Image (spheres, rainbow, N blue to C red):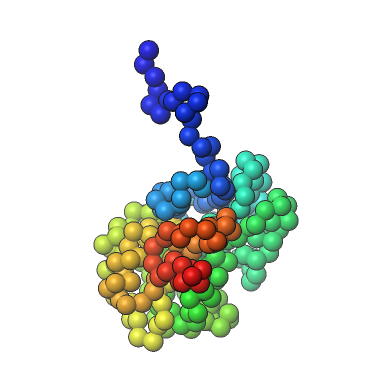
Amino acid sequence: MTRPIGWEPANRRPTPFGAAGRLGLVLPANNTVLEPELARWLPPDLAFHATRVPARGDLTAEAVRRMETEMDTAAAMIASTGIDALAICDMVTTFIMEPGWNEVTASRCSAAHGIPCFTAWTALHAALGALGVRRFALGTPYPRGIHALGLPFFSDLGYEVTADDTLDILSMRDVPAVSESRLAAFVAGIDRKGAEAIVLLATDLPTMAAIDRIEAETGLPVLSSNQAILWQALALLGRFTGPEPAGPGRLFDAAARRRG
């Protein structure tokens, strides 16, 4: 009899997926990046499960506001799987929705489902604090009009954006196609004088494979949306109290030093 790939006798089945913890993700529908990036780094005894909110066409403020109306429903759907923590993985809402949207959304989801909840921004905010970063060079893939909204947002929170640039990508489906070499060349063109770190935004921008390379080339720590989501998830799932958590960049080196 031909057996399906991965078949094992009942007495040899592996540990159930997510035996040590499960993370839920709410993603914009165009995002094909975060799941494979997390899959590369998440320990084998942790698992993630994702659901999506509609996102198509060009990245505009109107499209983001439409997408936000689906967040609570999507969060409820993924929470029904019995996850241990929930991540709202859309960075651009930070600059388009009203001030405090991230904190209110995370608090509402946590209260509704009885689990820790965080957003791409609250994770990045915590990561900036962990490294003591207040001044940074900023790179995004956003259209210039949306990119510009980030500058007053950071300034209002007491951060200094020492220099910034954008890939100025309008179509949502084009951001996941940015190559590692294109990203590295883009970062190389951003003035880093006076910066304590480089911050790269957007959960659909591939960054994780390039972080160590960019840190080596620039001498600065790199923080990206997806890296911060991984870091925050591992913290919430108890990984910073056990074996050293794996992840790209100095952010994870700092976590290891604090534990030691």
Q: Who's the residue at 65% across and 66% down the image? A: 103
Q: Residue at x 45, y 51 (%)?
A: 42
Q: Is residue 182 above or below residue 3?
A: below
The answer, for residue 189, to whether it is visible in the render is: yes
Between 156 and 217, the residue placed more toward the observer is 217
Q: Is residue 28 above or below residue 61?
A: above
Using the image, determine if residue 81 lies above or below residue 194: above
Q: Quarter of the image holding residue 122?
A: bottom right
Work out whether residue 74 can be spotted.
no
Q: Where is residue 16 in the image (x, y as percent from the top left)?
A: 53, 37
- In the rendered view, tell whether residue 24 sits above or below residue 60: above
Residue 77 location (% of width, % of height): 63, 43
Identify the residue at the far right of this view: 111
Estimate the x, y position of residue 7 in percent, counting from the top left.
Answer: 42, 25
Residue lying at the far bottom of the rendered structure: 194
Picture mark count: 0
Residue 235 at x, y percent in the picture: 55, 61
Q: Please report the residue visible at 43 percent of the width from the left and 48 percent of the height from the top.
A: 39
Q: Which residue is drawn at 48% across and 76% down?
A: 131
Task: Indicate left or right for 202 with 22 as reference.
Answer: left
Q: Relative to the observer, which residue lies in front, 244 or 200?
A: 244
State which quarter of the image contains the N terminus. Answer: top left
- In terms of depth relative to the viewer, which is nearer, 92 or 244? 244
